[in-house]
Structures are given as C-alpha cells and as structure tokens.
Image: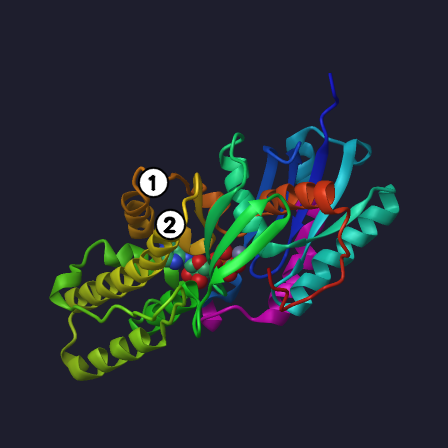
C-alpha cells in the first residue's frame, strides 16, 4: 500500500489566518481557521496593516494546533503549500515568509498556491470523487469569475465582472443599509426577513458572460435616498432581499448560459459568497439535472488553508512545484 502524502496548507491572503493538513490532496485531517472579524469590525472593513500583524502573531499557535489535530509531525509532511496571491500584499508576505522559514527549517519542499484555484479545490475536499472537467463559479470578496477547468492545474476564464465583485457588492450594500462589517453574512440574515417584491431592484444584465454590479448598487443608493428618514426596518429587510435576489439571479443567469453553451458533467460554485443562503438554493434549481452541482460546506467556502493544501498538492503533481513569490494581483 502506498503511504499517505500529507500537505501542510497556509492561508493569509486577507482576514482569515488558517493552517491545515490534508492527506492525498483530498482528506482534511485538520483545518484551523482564525477569523479577524472582531479585529476589523470597529473600522468597518479590513485594515491591511493590522491584518498582516495579526497573521504573524497567530500563525505559530495555529500551526501547532493544525499539526496536533492531524496527529502529524513536521517530518511527516511531503509538501508545504502557501497562498502567494491574489490578496493583500502585506498579508501574503507574512504567509509566504512563514512558509519559506518552515520549509528551510524542516527541509520540506514548498509550493506557492493561487488562492483562486484554492476556491475550486475546496470542492475536491467536499467530494473525493470529483474530477475535472468542470465549470466553476468563484464568487468572493474580490472575484466573480466563471471558469472552465478542463484538467487539474488548468483554468480558463470565460466570464468575469466589469466592476465590483459579488462579495464586494454585498459588503457595500450592507454598509448602505447600516449593517456594518462583515457585510455579506449580515445582509444574508436580514434578507431572510424581507420580501424582494416589495422593493424591487433592477437585475444587471450585460451581454455575454460578463457581470456588472455597480448599477445595482447605485439603484439601492437612490432608493434609500428617496425613502430618506421614513425608511423602516422592514423596508431595509425588503431592500436586502431585493439586492440579494438581483445579485444571485445575475450570477446564475450567466452560469445557466455557460451550461447551455456546452455541457459539463460537473459544476462547482464556491468562494465566500457561496455561503449565501439564496445562492445555495437557487444554484441547485438552475443547474437542475444538467450537471452534478458541488457547493462546499460553509467553512470550506470562505477562506481556509485546507483548500490551499489541496490546490498546492495537485498543482505540484501536474505542473511541478510553483514559485512562492508574492503576487497581490495574481490572476487565474
Ligand atoms: O472567499 P472569501 O472568504 O474571501 C475572499 O477571497 O474574498 O469571501 C469573502 C466575501 C465577503 O465579501 C463576504 O461578505 C462574502 O464573501 N460573504 C457572503 C456571505 N458570507 C460571506 N456574501 C453573501 N452572503 C453570505 N452568507
Ligand atoms: Zn477567498
């Protein structure tokens, strides 16, 4: 029997510090995540310098917890996989610096990982039998990307946003509605108590597979301005529901079009916004029986190191180990 291959994953691209141990790129042995929401809440958004410093302070302890949780020692690790981008420069530097330090101290190989690939590989952790080819929709704080994945380690972007990412749009709408940070989950909760039909907002519609959410954002701003002082808590809930519906239907309209253009056996919807209640429900309806849909569980949708370990394992296997140079604007 072949021995198990363990990958240590490190993720520090934004406001989650995470360390994980994954077996054979598929089985999560440990996935320790520290969210910095409490640190940034008072500022209404992520403060990059504070985020980077906090990653540095917390990594050593999280590393101990991840190894302990997996019952693994440094000598058991076959690979160290660290996010090299996209993300906040200072935050990425902390993760890569620690990864390089550990690789040198423990004489273990290191590979840099594309965070976006990680969001797709979160689905591989969810379903151990899942293999490309697949159609992916990655919706996060900075991306709304439709991608084709013909095989491991290869991605082709077929659609993206012209302006705001879906998560960014949710965060900004949440701020307008006075919901604070983190906006997406708060808007999701409020939307559950609202009715989109009472405060309908336009659904963005661009030709092709492109997204745009800036017009929708402006529509919300004007509606709130018109309502002025008279805006009631119920109005806000209805607006949250309407905004959520417009974003979700727009995301799925393009997914539907891509699926109609060419058949895919598998569809993956992931990234932080894939934690959204309505998106999870509607994605299943829209995909229907045309393909098998995988949406990772919530803890694998938002940023985590297990998905980085999985992506790093496969990328190293099919492409060789990747450079760990930090690239804040790394694309697919
Ligand atoms: O993937 P992620 O954790 O970090 C990035 O790589 O950006 O995604 C974070 C984004 C944020 O914009 C957050 O507001 C959004 O995902 N988000 C949600 C929900 N949970 C997280 N948006 C809508 N509904 C949610 N339940
Ligand atoms: Zn992410």
Query: On the image, which quarter does residue 162 sit in?
Result: bottom left
Of the 4 image quadrants, the one containing the C terminus is bottom right
Q: Secondary structure at mark 2?
A: helix
The residue drawn where x is 39% and y is 50% is: 275
Dots 1, 2 in contact, CB < 8 A: yes
The residue under the point 40% across, 64% down is 209
**Quarter of the figure with residue 251:** bottom left
Q: Mark 2 or mark 1, which is nearer the start of the sequence?
A: 2
Segment tinted magenta in the rendering: 42-63
Q: Does residue 79 appear to the left or right of 169 in the view shown?
A: right
Residue 243: image x %, image y %? Answer: 27, 66
Q: Is residue 38 visible?
A: no
Q: Check disc 2 and report the residue beneath it.
A: 259
Is 172 located above or below residue 112 in the figure?
below
Say which element carries label 1. Answer: loop
Q: Which quadrant would residue 289 be assigned to in this image?
A: top left
Determine the residue positioned at 77% across, 35% down: 77
Relative depth, front residue between 300 and 43: 300
Q: Position of residue 270 (x, y in %)?
A: 46, 49
């Amino acid at each position: 029997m072949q021995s198990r291959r363990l990958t240590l994953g490190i993720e520090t691209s934004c406001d989650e510090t995470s360390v994980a141990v994954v077996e054979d790129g598929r089985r999560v042995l440990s996935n320790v995540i520290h969210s910095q929401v409490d640190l940034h809440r008072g500022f209404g958004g992520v403060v990059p310098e504070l985020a980077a410093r906090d990653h540095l302070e917390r990594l050593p302890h999280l590393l101990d917890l991840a190894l302990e949780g997996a019952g693994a020692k440094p000598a058991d690790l076959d690979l160290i996989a660290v996010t090299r981008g996209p993300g906040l420069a200072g935050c990425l530097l902390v993760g890569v610096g620690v990864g390089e330090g550990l690789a040198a101290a423990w004489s273990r190989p290191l590979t840099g990982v594309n965070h976006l690939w990680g969001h797709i590989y979160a689905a591989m952790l969810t379903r151990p039998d899942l293999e490309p080819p697949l159609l992916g929709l990655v919706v996060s704080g900075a991306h709304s990307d439709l991608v084709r994945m013909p095989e491991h380690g290869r991605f082709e972007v077929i659609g993206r946003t012209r302006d705001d990412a879906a998560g960014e749009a949710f965060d900004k709408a949440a701020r307008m509605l006075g919901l604070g940070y983190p906006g997406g989950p708060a808007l999701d909760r409020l939307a559950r108590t609202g009715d989109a039909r009472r405060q309908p907002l336009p659904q963005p519609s661009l030709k092709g597979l492109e997204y745009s959410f800036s017009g929708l954002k402006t529509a919300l701003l004007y509606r709130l301005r018109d309502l002025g002082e008279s805006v009631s808590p119920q109005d806000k809930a209805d607006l949250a529901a309407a905004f959520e519906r417009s974003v979700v239907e727009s995301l799925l309209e393009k997914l539907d079009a891509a699926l109609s253009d060419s058949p895919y056996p598998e569809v993956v919807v992931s990234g932080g916004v894939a934690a959204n209640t309505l998106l999870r429900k509607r994605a299943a309806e829209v995909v229907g029986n045309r393909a098998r849909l995988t949406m990772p569980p919530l803890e694998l949708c938002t940023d985590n190191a297990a998905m980085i370990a999985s992506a790093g394992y496969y990328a190293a296997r099919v492409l060789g180990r990747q450079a760990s140079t930090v690239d804040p604007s790394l694309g697919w």
